[in-house]
Image (spheres, rainbow, N blue to C red):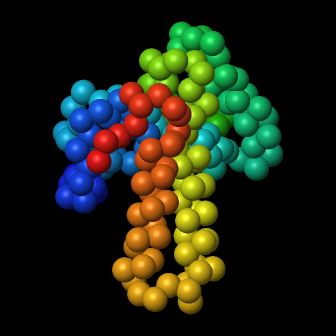
Amino acid sequence: MEIIDNVKDRGLIGKNLKLIISDDYGAIKSAVKFSFLNIPLQLCITYKLRNTISKVKHKNKRQVADDLKPVFNQETKQEAENQAKMFCKKWYLIEPKAVETFRNNLDYCFTYYQFPKEIWHKIRTSNAIEREFRELRRRIKIFDNSFNSIFSTKNYANTIFTNLNQNYPYSNPKLHTNY
């Protein structure tokens, strides 16, 4: 709850918020449900795959990874759910911890099917925006001696965030948050 309150205290209103994309942290899910009751939550499928594979014995990692990929590349939610069931049936006796990890909160990984297909690749994972944050941190580190004060560093970061908010991830303003 504290993380959502912190974001709200910094100005997030969320009046046009259509989707929240997050890693699979229980506290975030609970806070989102409480603070943004009717906003769908998409769990990052990249993290779901990584977390699942991290539970797999080394000798099976490649095959499990290959079997997981088709789950999130289906045309419909029903097909994705069927593919997930096939994966679980194949691996539950061999890699029970991996299957348990995979099945946990899996429904939240299929939220993207509620949105237009053209944007699925942008909303199934939080990796794209995380890449932007890494790039911002890298730039600030490079320019660290160029900034006169913490204020100038914050202004630089705010300029980047404002640009991202206005132009990311998609030109459809219905998917953007309004601060």
- In terms of image quadrants, where is residue 45? top right
Does 91 sit above or below residue 163? above
Q: Where does the image place residue 102, in percent across and percent down from the top left?
A: 54, 35
Q: Where does the image place residue 72, in percent across and percent down from the top left?
A: 62, 25
Does 58 sit above or below residue 135? above
Q: Residue at x 24, y 54 (%)?
A: 11
Q: Residue at x 65, y 44 (%)?
A: 53
Q: Can residue 125 be seen?
A: yes
Q: Where does the image place residue 28, in percent across and percent down from the top left?
A: 32, 47
Between 1 and 114, the one nearer to me in the picture: 114
- In terms of image quadrants, where is residue 143? bottom right
Between 33 and 171, the one nearer to me in the picture: 171
Q: Is residue 155 left or right of 96 when viewed as pictured? A: left
Q: Residue at x 61, y 63 (%)?
A: 135
Between 11 and 87, the one nearer to me in the picture: 11
- In terms of image quadrants, where is residue 88? top right
Q: Residue at x 41, y 71 (%)?
A: 155
Question: How many numbered badges does the structure rendering display?
Answer: 0
Q: Is residue 126 left or right of 15 when viewed as pictured? A: right
Q: Is residue 20 left or right of 102 when viewed as pictured? A: left
Q: Can residue 105 be seen?
A: no
Does 72 sit above or below residue 160? above
Q: Where does the image place residue 91, in percent across and percent down from the top left?
A: 66, 29
